[in-house]
């Protein structure tokens, strides 16, 4: 334990997270109001400065969480998101401005965070979170934060974190409420102890259907970031399996205790099914489906645009190719993946992709 476990343990913890640490230390006045807190102190602040956080998803929840952690002193952040900033994001994402519409979310968020802390190590990763990426990033961080909009990706993160012994914070928001729970491998329940299997498609409304009140992700991000600070500083006040539910509209907060499931396929039997189950399609929160290429590689977008010209309206816009064809619009990225809008059926989206983009 970094704060109370003795010098050796504290040194080991700091050394583990030392990569990318800046040299500003804790003697500057920037963190004076935190250092004075008995629950944190100078050692806790120093530990935060030497820690690495991975934020998966750069919508409102992820970007609020990243900003709070950065301002609290966690200055080594990796941000993952596959999507582009859309106008419908602006009512709840503090880091984005109208000028960011059309930019990759991870890059727009990283630029905004660098303006807050120019010396910080901020790494944007514009990519779909697949098993390969999860297994690459998770072992190289100290905590994983949830900015996701779908359960499928959360099960993947849960598998990777339990497998590699990295703590993470599950957080989800919808309409006027949200839930959050710290997941401490070996010391508490995991996501599959709480929800053993994903719900069938359509069982949970998306944020496009149910809506999302602007302040809700900010509130849940504040709880999530606090939990991350407790995790990183090994606070004895942190309790695994503490599920917090906030309803901002009703002004209600509930805390329930989740127990570890002895027959949990993930943390009990250590079967990491979601790491072993790659899917080429995923339904997005909103309108559309993402389709991945069969094999990784770089697409020649200009060549593809020329090939599609007799069949469809196809134009390269910045770093993406936009194709309007049949009843759909495909936004194709250089890494081969595509966002298919106007289509809700994943199989139909994959058919369009295979028919026109990569045969
Ligand atoms: Zn479990």
Image (spheres, rainbow, N blue to C red):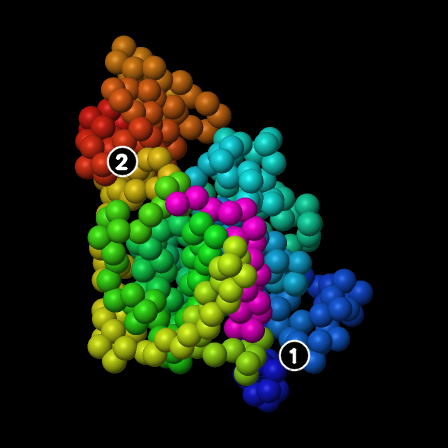
| Ligand 1 closer than 8 Å to label 1 CB | no
Residue 53 at x, y percent in the picture: 52, 61
Where residue 213 appears, as percent x and y from the top left, is 51, 47
Which residue is identified by label 2? Answer: 344
In the picture, residue 293 is in which quadrant?
Answer: top left
Sequence-first tag of 1 and 2: 1
- The question of residue 230 being in magenta is answered with yes
SS label for mark 1: loop
Q: Is residue 312 left or right of residue 173?
A: left
Q: Residue at x 57, y 61 (%)?
A: 222
| Residue appearing at x 52%, y 73% in the figure | 231
Return the residue nearer the eye: 356 or 93: 93
Q: Is 354 on the left-hand or right-hand side of 177?
A: left
Q: Which residues are magenta?
A: 210-232
Within-10-Å neighbours for mark 1: few <14, some 14–19, many 20+: some
Residue 102 % position (x, y): 50, 31
Image quarter hosting the N terminus: bottom right
Q: Residue furthest bottom?
A: 6
Question: Would you say residue 105 is visible in this rendering?
Answer: yes
Depth check: give the residue in front, 26 or 39.
39
Q: Nearer the viewer, residue 308 or 60?
A: 60
Residue 151 included in the magenta stretch of the image: no
Residue at which label 1 appears: 39
Label annotation for residue 151: none
Instruction: Give the mark toward the camera: 1 or 2.
Output: 2
Taking 193 as reference, is 78 above or below it?
above
User: Is any atom of residue 80 visible in this view?
Assistant: no
Left or right, 10 with respect to 59, comes to right
Distance from label 1 to label 2 (Cα)? Answer: 48 Å
x, y percentage for residue 188?
Answer: 38, 78
Q: Secondary structure at mark 2?
A: loop
């Amino acid at each position: 334990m970094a704060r109370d476990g003795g010098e050796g343990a504290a040194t080991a913890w700091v050394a583990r997270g030392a990569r990318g640490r800046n040299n500003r230390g804790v003697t500057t006045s920037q963190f004076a109001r935190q250092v004075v807190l008995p629950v944190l102190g100078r050692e806790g602040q120093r530990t935060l400065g030497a820690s690495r956080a991975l934020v998966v998803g750069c919508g409102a929840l992820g970007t609020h969480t990243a900003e709070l952690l950065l301002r609290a002193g966690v200055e080594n952040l990796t941000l993952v998101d596959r999507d582009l900033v859309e106008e419908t994001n602006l009512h709840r994402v503090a880091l984005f401005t109208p000028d960011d519409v059309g930019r990759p979310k991870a890059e727009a968020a990283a630029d905004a965070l660098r303006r807050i802390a120019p010396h910080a190590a901020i790494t944007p990763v514009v990519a779909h979170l697949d098993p390969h990426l999860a297994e690459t990033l998770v072992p190289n961080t100290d905590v994983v934060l949830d900015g996701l909009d779908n359960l499928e990706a959360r099960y993947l993160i849960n598998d990777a974190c339990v497998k590699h012994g990295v703590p993470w914070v599950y957080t989800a928001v919808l309409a006027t409420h949200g839930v959050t729970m710290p997941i401490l491998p070996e010391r508490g329940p995991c996501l599959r102890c709480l929800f053993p299997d994903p719900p069938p498609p359509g069982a949970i409304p998306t944020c496009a259907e149910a809506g999302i009140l602007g302040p809700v992700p900010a509130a849940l991000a504040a709880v999530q970031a606090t939990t991350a600070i407790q995790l990183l500083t090994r606070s004895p006040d942190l309790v695994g399996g503490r599920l917090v539910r906030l309803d901002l509209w009703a002004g209600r907060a509930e805390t329930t205790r989740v127990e570890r499931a002895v027959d949990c396929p993930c943390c009990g039997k250590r079967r990491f099914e979601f790491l072993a189950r790659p899917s080429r399609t995923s339904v997005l929160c909103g309108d559309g489906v993402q389709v991945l290429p069969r094999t990784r590689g770089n697409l020649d977008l200009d060549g593809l645009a020329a090939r599609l010209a007799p069949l469809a309206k196809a134009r390269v816009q910045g770093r993406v190719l936009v194709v309007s064809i049949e009843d759909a619009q495909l936004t194709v990225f250089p890494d081969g993946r595509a966002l298919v809008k106007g289509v809700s059926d994943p199989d139909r989206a994959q058919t369009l992709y295979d028919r026109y983009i990569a045969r």
